[in-house]
Amino acid sequence: MNTDEKEVSLKAWRQLYEAAVLGLDPTKIQDRIEEAEKAIAKRAIAVMREGGDGAEREALANAMQALSDLKRHLTERNRGTEPKKENMRDTKT
């Protein structure tokens, strides 16, 4: 893969990731998340084959984790449940 193709691949997964995370249209978010996950997975495989740098591997892992967190949040919101929060104050009198 030449430098131009590598740069395009790098930009592609980041653009799809940003569209999923920053997208405001709730009707498109699931599709955008799936597209971003596929692009990130493809890029991760390419980076492993090329012996790519650790910084991009870390960015890919962080992006996948963020998408996973976003999906979990959306699922909880759609179910009408809120993420569990620890009670910070003692309710006993």
Image: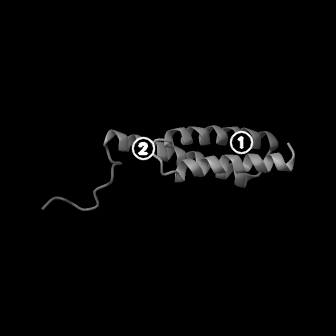
Residue placed furthest toward the right: 2
In this view, the residue in front, 27 or 2, is 27
User: Which mark identifies residue 54?
Assistant: none
Left or right, 57 with reference to 92: right
Rendered residue at 72%/38% (across/down): 45
Q: CA distance from mark 2 to mark 1?
A: 25 Å
Rendered residue at 70%/42% (across/down): 44
In this view, the residue in front, 21 or 81, is 21
Q: Which residue is mark 1?
A: 43
User: Which mark identifies residue 74?
Assistant: 2
Left or right, 84 with reference to 33: left
Say which element carries label 2: helix
Check the picture and name the quadrant holding the C terminus.
Answer: bottom left
**How many numbered marks are there?**
2
Colouring: one colour
Contact, CB < 8 Å: mark 2 with mark 1? no
What's the amino acid at mark 1? Answer: Arg
Residue 72 percent location from the top left of the image: 44, 42
Q: Is residue 31 above or below residue 63?
A: above
Examine the image and state in which quarter residue 46 appears: top right
Residue 62 percent location from the top left of the image: 60, 51
Around disc 1, counting alpha carbons within 10 Å, would you say few (fewer than 14), some (14 to 19), or many (20 or more)? Answer: many
Pointer 2 or 1: first along the chain: 1
Q: Is residue 29 above or below residue 53?
A: above
What's the amino acid at mark 2? Answer: Leu
Around disc 2, counting alpha carbons within 10 Å, would you say few (fewer than 14), some (14 to 19), or many (20 or more)? Answer: some
Residue 75 percent location from the top left of the image: 40, 40
Left or right, 66 with reference to 2: left
Residue 65 percent location from the top left of the image: 55, 47
Say which element carries label 1: helix
